[in-house]
Every structure is written in C-alpha cells, then in structure tokens.
Image (cartoon, rainbow, N blue to C red):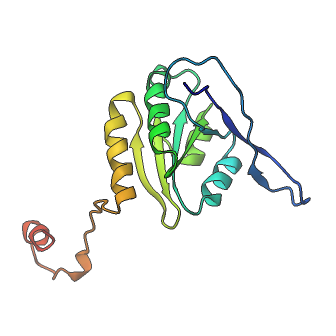
Amino acid sequence: MLPKVRTELGYKSDDGTGEYSSKVKIERVKNTGQASTEVAKVRSKQQHEVIVNEERERLVVVRYIAPWCQACRAAEPSFRKLAYQLSSDVKFVEMPLKDEEEWDSVGVSSVPFAHIFHPEAGLVEEMKMHRSDMPAVKKVLGDYLDGSCELLTYLFDDVEDGDDEDEQQNQFQ
C-alpha cells in the first residue's frame, strides 16, 4: 500500500521576484490502509490564487475546511479517496480557514465547502463537501472531465416582453 504523502505550497523566490511557486514537502507517515495521494495544502489567500492560476491543464478542486469542524474531519477519507481516483485529471487542494475574514476572502459561507476551477473558465462550481456530498462531487467532476456538464442558461433577452413565465421556460426546453 502507498504511504500517505502531503504536499504544501510554500514561498519560493529563486529568481528574486518574490513570487509564490509550488514547493513540495513530502512527509511519510504511518499507512492507515486508506487510499492516499498528493493534496496541496495552502495557508493563505495569495497561495490559493497562485495554485489556482498556475494550473493550465487540469480542473482544480479546492476544499475549504476549519480545524474545529467535525464534518470536515469526517469527509477527509472520502476526499482523499476521490483525489486518489482522479489525481491524474484533477488537482486537489485543501485550505484551512481560521476566521470569518478568511471565509469572506475566498467566498465561503460554511465548511466543508469546495470550489471547482476550470483552467480557462475560472470558478465553475461551488458545492458542499460533506461526506454525503462526495458522490455528487464525483459526478460533477466526471461530467466536466467528459465534457458533458449541464449548464443552465436562461437568455431572457431573446424573450419578448409580455410573455409569462411558463412560456419563457417552455422556450428553453
């Protein structure tokens, strides 16, 4: 079985620019028998932005957690298993949030929560990330990877004034 591996994003300034870059810290820990893979850990809004913006080929799933959150801990094995299954196509990131200011800075209202970023479109999904939500998260990721995600778009500009709501909905079905 594979040992657990942890990845962290760190400060790196090899060229003197002072910009953030990926820095891998691998830590071997006792194998728990659960699926494991690399999940990047970010500690600040700046690191969060760098890791999301640097990824040009894969989807990025950022899981927001809080140290005190029991639901976050309960969902962790399912999140790690999902990361193990999809790591070749999706980059997985985890960001602990300590206070409301951090929550607001990344647009999160509760934990555990996730944002899914597309390399070209940016933020495309916001969803809960409880253990019971993992099948839905896996389906959404699968849909994006297959190129068959369902997007609900209402173009009311094309609807004539005076049409009632039922007629507007029928136009788009």
Above or below for 166 versus 128: below
Answer with the quarter of the image where residue 161 lies: bottom left
- Relative to the observer, which residue lies in front, 49 or 28? 28
- Relative to the observer, which residue lies in front, 33 or 92? 33
Q: Position of residue 103 (x, y in %)?
A: 56, 40
Q: Residue furthest front?
A: 1
Count up the numbered dots: 0
Q: Is residue 56 left or right of residue 14?
A: left
Answer with the quarter of the image where residue 92 lies: top right
Q: Position of residue 168 (x, y in %)?
A: 13, 71
Can residue 23 be seen from the camera position used here? yes
Can residue 110 be seen from the camera position used here? no
Above or below for 26 versus 10: above
Q: Position of residue 63 (x, y in %)?
A: 51, 39
- Relative to the observer, which residue lies in front, 116 or 38? 38
Q: Residue at x 26, y 75 (%)?
A: 155
Q: Is residue 80 left or right of residue 101?
A: left
Q: Position of residue 24 (x, y in %)?
A: 73, 41
Q: Which quadrant is the N terminus positioned in?
A: top right
Q: Residue at x 60, y 47 (%)?
A: 105
Q: Which quadrant is the C terminus positioned in?
A: bottom left
Answer with the quarter of the image where residue 159 lies: bottom left
Q: Residue at x 32, y 46 (%)?
A: 139
Q: Residue furthest right?
A: 16
